[in-house]
Image: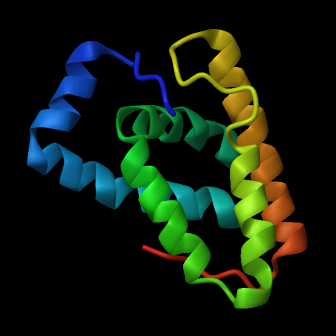
Amino acid sequence: RLEVSVGVGFSKMIKEDPRCRATLNRVVPVLFNLVAFEKSTSKVWSLSRPLATAIACDGKSFDGFCARFVQAQPESERACLSNLLKMLYVDIRFDTSYQSKNQFTKNLCRFSQAVQSKLPRMRMVV
């Protein structure tokens, strides 16, 4: 589902070195929780680029984290959260183009704002 073109060397390192993958798998939940619970759009904006790169490098791990994230929430909020997560991918090709980076940042800001307004009981997951 995700296109990887964030730099062949970096992407290859993530895929081949288990230590890099383990580090990325610890960093992504932290970044995502910061985005989901941060009220400042400027902070969300600054986290969007590293999060997009991490997703592009290892989309399967991000998808797994999202599944755990949804399951950890109150049952009444899971469907809404799943739909909000889908909105992250609208008009996105995870590549290095300015347009893709900009669109992901916009989607992430909308996601953060929607989570805070629609899902006040949501919990952090690591």
Quadrant of residue 118 in the image?
A: bottom right
Q: Nearer the viewer, residue 41 or 104?
A: 104
Judged left or right of residue 47, residue 27 is: left
Picture layout, residue 124 above or below residue 83: below
Judged left or right of residue 62, residue 102 is: right
**Which residue is drawn at the image coordinates 66% and 47% (left, top)?**
43
Picture layout, residue 42 above or below residue 30: above
**Which residue is drawn at the image coordinates 36% and 55% (left, top)?**
27
Picture layout, residue 44 above or below residue 5: below
Residue 53 appears in view: yes
Judged left or right of residue 99, residue 114 is: right
Structure colour scheme:
rainbow
**Which residue is drawn at the image coordinates 70% and 43% (left, top)?**
88
Quadrant of residue 97 in the image?
A: top right
Considering every residue shown, the one lying at the far right of the view is: 117
**Which residue is drawn at the image coordinates 79% and 87% (left, top)?**
76
Considering every residue shown, the one lying at the far top of the view is: 97
Q: Position of residue 112 (x, y in %)?
A: 76, 56
Q: How many marks?
A: 0
Q: Position of residue 77 (x, y in %)?
A: 78, 80
Q: Position of residue 26 (x, y in %)?
A: 31, 60
Q: Nearer the viewer, residue 74 or 46?
A: 74
Q: Position of residue 106 (x, y in %)?
A: 78, 34
Residue 40 appears in view: no
The C terminus sits in image quarter:
bottom left
